[in-house]
Image: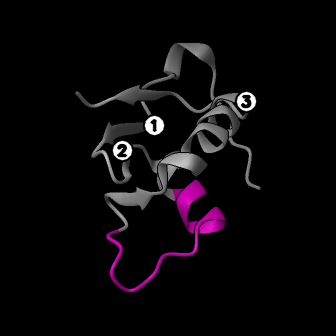
Amino acid sequence: MVEISLPLCMVKTDFYFRNAISFISLMPVSIRAELWVKENITLEEWQDKNEIAIEPRMFEDMYKGLIKIGMVIESAS
């Protein structure tokens, strides 16, 4: 897993997420989020790298892991 740290004064949102009921949409919006996705997520052909479909049962652990490595993740709604 890639861990990227920035000084606190430079922290901005890395990911937005949206609950689409049958899946959670995860949207990387920073360069470090895009790098994390490239290194840590294998996308299927049907998945869009700008809006990644995540199974709701898997999202909580992913959310906690992203926070733990210093990513900033916010709801898009």
Residue segment shown in magenta? 35-48
What residue is at 72 percent from the left and 35 percent from the top? 69
What residue is at 60 percent from the left and 37 percent from the top? 60
Q: Which residue is mark 1?
A: 14
Q: Closer to the N terminus: mark 1 or mark 3?
A: 1
Q: Is residue 66 left or right of residue 75?
A: right
Q: Is residue 29 left or right of residue 62?
A: left
Specify the quadrant that holds the N terminus: bottom right
Q: Amino acid at mark 3?
A: Lys
Residue 5, compared with residue 48, is above or below; it is above
Specify the quadrant that holds the C terminus: top left
What residue is at 32 percent from the left and 57 percent from the top? 51
Q: Which mark is residue 68?
A: 3
Q: Nearer the viewer, mark 1 or mark 3?
A: 3
x, y (%) of residue 74? 40, 26
x, y (%) of residue 26? 40, 48
